[in-house]
């Protein structure tokens, strides 16, 4: 299975290097390739169609991740930031700000819809294709489309829903609020979760993780736990796949981000870039100290890395994930280094889902569903009670950091909130600068009140007047969401 997956991932890279998605957003056909009604002749044609949306994501993923961290307490602008980045950092948002433009996410949706219209026609020309093949392919397309919708729903608060798999925008769009869209996505994804992935290659192995995160967003913690476990246990014949074990322990943690799309034991899905094929990831330029240096790590995340204690040699600091890995410093100036780990400059992949992310979401759901002890095990030194998880070592142990013990929770603290704070903090460390922090803060603040988010974001501003103004604005949930033109 692992060898087959490697072959498919190599095919991803080859095709993504060739694919072009440059036409106008409002074009009826969102790419310059042959139209699907003429091109869908074989299983290979359909597999390539499943990859195409990832190519489109190259045009939106960098600014989406960069902007999301600026909205949170993860990064802050430098004096080099232009007006658009300044406005995002200060939560003074305009619908025409190019860095928060959702149009390329809608291109992903339209591209997937276009392929879904024709994919069943392959059976007419390829006699070897099976009903299961068709279901797997449709599941892939619905999966990436659902991820795009979910991203829009979380960042913008509502979605322009394109009905009936239409491959174009219509004049009378239906706008669905975030809460209702979550239910729609669950209904769309559920029929495609029962495919036997042992026998059929699935190009979007993240569907179960996606629906698990959607349930977590809905605060349906039992279903979130069940589906996130399903995602982690997706391949029984390879028990190490998607487990947090010794594979990326200590300094090997950096290797997760080197040619990420091929690191299939950790990475579920990534948007690949390759400078040698003119696929430039600009996020490295935006963060690079000797490049544009538009934004830098906040004191919050730098201090959080620095107060960790390494259990191997009692050195203070998160030495494998912090200084020299996620961030670095020159002449006392901190800068994000996570996208400078790739040997070829401007070629860092952007990871959408990886094992540690899914495990921490699972810990959050477990804690909220009443199993705080298991949540701390995932967070600390490994949840080994389940079959196939025997080699799990936990998020913090993989980084050689001290474990959290349930019995050490102070008796005058609410245990669920206490454990949740540890989980959210660990997500900040493990997933620093990967664009996860803003949606994490929003998700938790919906159940714990807007001050949870507003207080944390306000702390990043050195100007107290700015801090107070942003805090006051973020006390209203309506101001969390990005504006977009209708």
Image (tube, helix red, strand yellow):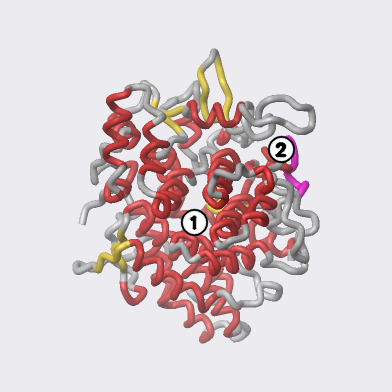
Which secondary structure is most common in the magenta stretch? helix
Residue segment shown in magenta: 245-252
Q: Residue at x 58, y 67 (%)?
A: 227
Residue 248 within the magenta-colored segment of the rendering: yes
Q: CA distance from mark 1 to mark 2?
A: 38 Å
Quarter of the image containing the N terminus? Answer: bottom right
Q: Residue at x 67, y 43 (%)?
A: 408
Instruction: Tell me where residue 464 appears, x and y as whole percent.
Output: 32, 24
Residue 48 within the magenta-colored segment of the rendering: no
Determine which residue is flagged by label 2: 402
Q: Is residue 423 above or below residue 219?
A: above
Displayed quadrant of residue 86: top left
Q: Is residue 155 left or right of residue 263?
A: left
Q: Of marks 1 and 2, which one's residue comes earlier in the chain?
A: 1
Quarter of the image containing the C terminus? Answer: bottom left
Displayed quadrant of residue 11: bottom right
Determine which residue is flagged by label 1: 54
Instruction: Tell me where residue 175 appears, x and y as whole percent.
Output: 26, 65
Kindly give the residue lying farthest to the top in the view shown: 331
Instruction: Tell me where residue 432 appears, x and y as whole percent.
Output: 54, 39
Q: Does any portion of residue 273 appear in the rendered image?
A: no
Q: Residue at x 75, y 42 (%)?
A: 249
Q: Is residue 340 above or below residue 452?
A: above
Dot 2 lies on which element?
loop
Label 1 packing within 10 angstroms: few (<14), some (14-19), many (20+): many
The residue closer to the viewer here, 483 or 475, is 475
Displayed quadrant of residue 224: bottom right
The residue closer to the viewer here, 75 or 406, is 406
Which of the two marks, 1 or 2, is nearer to us in this view?
2
Q: Residue at x 67, y 38 (%)?
A: 254
Instruction: Tell me where residue 139 appears, x and y as whole percent.
Output: 52, 73
Kindly give the residue lying farthest to the front in the view shown: 412
């Amino acid at each position: 299975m692992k060898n087959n997956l490697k072959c498919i991932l190599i095919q991803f890279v080859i095709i993504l290097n060739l694919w072009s998605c440059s036409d106008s957003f409002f074009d009826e056909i969102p790419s310059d390739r042959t139209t699907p009604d003429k091109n869908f002749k074989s299983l290979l044609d359909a597999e390539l169609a499943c990859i195409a949306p990832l190519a489109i994501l190259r045009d939106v993923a960098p600014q989406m991740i960069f902007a999301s961290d600026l909205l949170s307490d993860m990064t802050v602008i430098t004096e080099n930031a232009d007006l658009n980045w300044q406005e995002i950092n200060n939560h003074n948002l305009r619908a025409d700000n190019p860095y928060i433009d959702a149009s390329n996410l809608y291109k992903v949706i339209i591209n997937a819809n276009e392929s879904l219209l024709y994919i069943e026609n392959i059976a007419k020309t390829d006699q070897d294709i099976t009903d299961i093949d068709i279901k797997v392919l449709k599941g892939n397309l619905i999966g990436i489309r659902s991820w795009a919708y979910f991203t829009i729903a979380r960042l913008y608060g509502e979605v322009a829903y394109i009905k009936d798999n239409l491959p174009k925008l219509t004049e009378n769009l239906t706008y669905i609020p975030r809460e209702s869209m979550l239910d729609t996505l669950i209904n769309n994804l559920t029929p495609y979760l029962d495919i036997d992935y042992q026998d059929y290659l699935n190009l979007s192995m993240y569907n179960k993780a996606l629906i698990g995160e959607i349930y977590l967003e809905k605060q349906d913690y039992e279903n979130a736990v069940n589906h996130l476990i399903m995602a982690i246990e997706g391949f029984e014949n390879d028990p190490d796949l998607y487990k947090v074990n010794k594979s990326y322990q200590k300094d090997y943690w950096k290797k997760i981000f080197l040619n990420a799309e091929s690191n299939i034991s950790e990475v579920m899905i990534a948007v690949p870039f390759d400078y040698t094929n003119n696929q430039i990831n600009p996020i490295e330029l935006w963060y690079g100290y000797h490049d544009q240096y538009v934004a830098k790590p906040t004191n919050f995340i730098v201090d959080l890395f620095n107060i960790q204690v390494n259990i191997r040699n009692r050195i203070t600091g998160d030495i494998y994930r912090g200084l020299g890995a996620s961030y670095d410093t020159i002449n006392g100036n901190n800068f994000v280094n996570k996208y400078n780990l790739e040997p070829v400059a401007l070629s860092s992949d952007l990871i959408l889902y990886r094992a540690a992310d899914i495990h921490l979401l699972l810990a959050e759901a477990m804690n909220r569903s009443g199993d705080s002890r298991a949540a701390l095990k995932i967070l600390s030194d490994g949840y080994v009670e389940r079959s196939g998880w025997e080699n799990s070592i936990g998020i913090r142990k993989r980084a050689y950091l001290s474990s959290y013990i349930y019995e050490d929770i102070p008796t005058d603290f609410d245990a669920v909130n206490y454990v949740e704070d540890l989980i959210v903090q660990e997500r900040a460390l493990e997933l620093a600068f990967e664009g996860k922090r803003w949606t994490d803060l929003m998700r938790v603040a919906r159940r714990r009140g807007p001050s949870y988010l507003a207080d944390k974001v306000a702390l990043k501003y050195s100007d107290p007047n700015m801090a107070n103004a942003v805090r006051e604005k973020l006390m209203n949930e309506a101001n969390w969401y990005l504006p977009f033109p209708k």
